[in-house]
Image (spheres, helix red, strand yellow):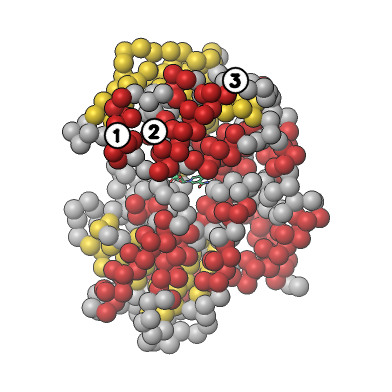
Amino acid sequence: MTQANSTWRVAVVGSGPAAFYTAEALFKSGTGEVSVDLFDRLPVPFGLVRGGVAPDHQKIKGVVKVYDKIAANPGFRFFGNICLGRDLQVEDLNQHYHQVVYAFGCESDSKLGIDGEDLAGVYAATDFVGWYNSHPDHRHHQFDLQNAKRVALIGNGNVAMDVARILLASPDELAKTDIAEHSLETLRKSTVEEVILLGRRGPAQAAFSPKEIAEIAELPNVDVVVTKADATLDELSATWLEKDGARSQRRNVDFCLQQAELGEGEHQNKLRCRFLVSPTAIHGENNKLTAISVDHMKLQADDNGTPRPRATGESEEIPVDLLFKAIGYRGEPVAGVPYEERKGIVPNIDGRVVEQVDGDVRIGHYTAGWCKRGPTGLIGTNSLDAKDTVAGMLADYQDGKTLSPTKNDVAELLSERALNSVSWADWQRLDEWERKEGASRGKLRHKLTSIEELMAVIAELRTK
Ligand code: NAP
């Protein structure tokens, strides 16, 4: 696409849901000609939809059909394998675009900050998720599932649900998906039978979605076990649920009560949901994890009446062979982009980037998605979030509060620097290749796990 001088030019850093929804909102803004260039440091698009959503959740991954339609807009371009801070600097974007949107998500994991977190056998769920999803950053991780029976899983959000399901599901079922081959091989040798889910609040405050926990109970070889003591609400939670609880929270409580009635069940694999337990230390011998200590908690109302966990003074040591921390993603700083250390996000006011918290707005710079608001919400949440950011961008554009680009097409700069960027057409060819290669192996898609391999196949496909 050649760009007329009158074109409203926007660069989006990232190509996950927030980036695509930003592009969509820009195309729908009804403001003359708009061009949107998406940059991704990986050669492949879709962020956590490709590298985060579990391989047995293909329906959720199907959202890429929406992104394909957005990419079909004549104003859309993709520049994969281009990393901000390495190949391009913020100053380069300033010279080529009227506006820049940071939508690079949160790529790291939160830390517990307790003793023993570095022991062998203690893993970040985010690494496990990237590993089974063939994310190039996580290909070298190793998970010692062959010598473990009992796993502690800290946190009870939907990432914890994904980790529990992949650990407990039948590898034969996973084999039909697009799961990484190295992961399937390891999972086939796994001896894990029991996952203990440790939630620091009660069942009414569990972070999992009702559908996600129910899906685990429906697995043919797994019992979801909740004790009656754990399933029964304390008085404060019962009142709070009645008054302020969401429908999903009531469903979670009902689910736990139902499971408590079922008892231990008869299947070999168990997901044990524990509540009101907060980790205090991880123990090991010879640098290898052996157990986790937890404080028992009770809920107390804060000033707004919201139940908050407080230690009761009782504690417990739980022997475990492995431990996964699923306590949330965290954003890392990116070169030249303001960073709010406390929250791990790009500091902003309603999507307008500020130099620092309470600092000046950086004209022409915006943010959307997890790096704007933190790592919460479902894929669709990013659509509303992007629309809000684009509303501010549009208002600023109409007020003339934009950058003043002096150069026309970033493609020229990339070629001057001899950078091998991946276009949307390249991706479409790779996408087809991955599907065909997958079909020949009896699975949905075969994903390569290294940037070198991906670039080699892309280069070969260009010659055909
Ligand atoms: P999350 O939903 O925020 O869950 C994090 C969990 O970690 C919570 O249970 C939290 O407890 C706990 N936690 C945090 N710090 C802790 C600490 N220091 N000690 C003990 N527990 C701690 O995050 P997530 O699971 O990473 O998911 C991120 C977002 O992606 C969520 O919005 C999720 O719904 C979404 N997602 C959706 C799907 C799906 O729909 N299939 C799949 C994966 C992810 P508290 O609640 O007490 O803070």
Residue in the foreground of this view, choosing between 29 and 426: 29
Left or right for 114, reference 461: left
Q: Amino acid at mark 3?
A: Glu
- How far across and how far down the image is residue 305, in percent? 22, 34
- How far across and how far down the image is residue 405, in percent? 34, 77
* Quadrant of the displayed image that contains ligand 1: top left
Left or right for 419, reference 277: right
Q: Quadrant of residue 439?
A: bottom right
Residue position for label 2: 204
Residue position for label 3: 264
Q: Alpha-carbon distance for marks 3 and 1?
A: 29 Å
Find out whether the residues at labels 1 and 2 contact each other: C-beta distance under 8 Å: yes
- The vertical placement of 100 against 337, above or below, is below
Q: Earlier in the sequence, mark 2 or mark 3?
A: 2
Q: Amino acid at mark 2?
A: Ala
Residue position for label 1: 240
Q: Quadrant of residue 172?
A: top right
